[in-house]
Image (cartoon, grey):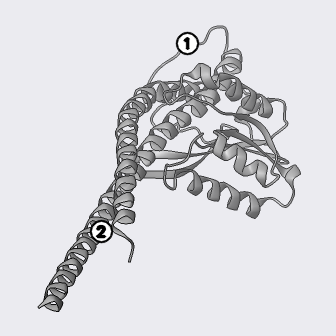
Amino acid sequence: MASLRDIKGRITSTKKTKQITKAMEMVSASKMNRAEQNARNYVPYSEKIEEVVSSIAQGGGDASHPMLEARDVKKTGYLVITSDRGLAGAFNSSILRRVYQQIRSKHTSADEYTLITIGRIGRDFFRKRNMPVDMDITGVSDQPDFADIKDIASNTVQLYTDERIDQLYIFYNHYVSAITQEVTEKKILPLTDLNTEGKAGRSSYEYEPNQEEILEVLLPQYAESLIYGALLDSKASEHAARMTAMKSATDNADELIGDLTLSYNRARQAAITQEITEIVGGAAALE
């Protein structure tokens, strides 16, 4: 049995750890609330730009654009959003496992795909496995602005425009609730899956100078907005996952402290009983 000093030391260290995890839980809860609000506030813009793009693309004119047309797939791009830090439960591992399994099942050569990563965890994961990472960005703030990822978003879209990739998928964790996040896969390019139902006829637009020139400007912005929206969603999921993980750690620390305290009290009682026995035994020997 461990000594009283050892048990007392473990209780003290566990209490200090509990203070840290509790503080991290509270910080993550605060960040999650703000990130969730950011993601919600972005939805109206995302829906409106999709409505406009759908209206132009399905307007019945002669307007066309390479980003709206599927082509033979020779190379696929995967944009993967993870976090820069751990301690977030299965937030990173679940999405990395999903991407890795899909690549292994669909591709036989590294020449058939390329990776774009947002977040240090994802970048390091793929590089350690010698998988092609074309672009990466780390150090994105907890409440990101579009300017933080504008370069990587525009460069990713440019990969498709330059025909260096023929389709682009994005993988991220979708925020459902504070305790639920879903790994989400979405095709960004080509834009062949626009949700046009009930939207094309909702508003009437006049185009100046013409539809094709508007699409030339609007479609890259729309694709970039999808990437930014996914990042906002992922950030809310990250903070929620970290809050849940830290709450679980705090609860486990409470349970461990209770068990250690019980062991400490039992050990102290045994020591006291032993001392009383020795005193009684010594007194009896003197009689």
- Residue picked out by circle 1: 206
Up-down relation of residue 222 to residue 72 (above or below): above
Foreground residue, 130 or 167? 130
Q: Amino acid at mark 2?
A: Asp
Answer whether residue 63 is visible to the viewer in this image: no
Q: Which residue is mark 2?
A: 259
- The reply, left or right, for residue 264 in relation to residue 87 is left
Q: Residues within 10 Å of mark 2 (few under 14, many from 20)?
A: few
The quadrant in which the C terminus is found is bottom left
Quadrant of the snapshot with the N terminus: bottom left
Asked which quadrant contains residue 58, the reply is: top right
Task: Using the image as rendered, state which of residue 236 and residue 76 is in the foreground.
Answer: 236
What residue sits 59% from the left and 29% below the top? 140
Tell how many labels.
Answer: 2
Toward which corner of the image does residue 54 lie, by quadrant?
A: top right
Residue 242 location (% of width, % of height): 44, 46
Amino acid type at mark 1? Glu
Q: Quadrant of residue 102?
A: bottom right
| Residue furthest out toward the front | 286
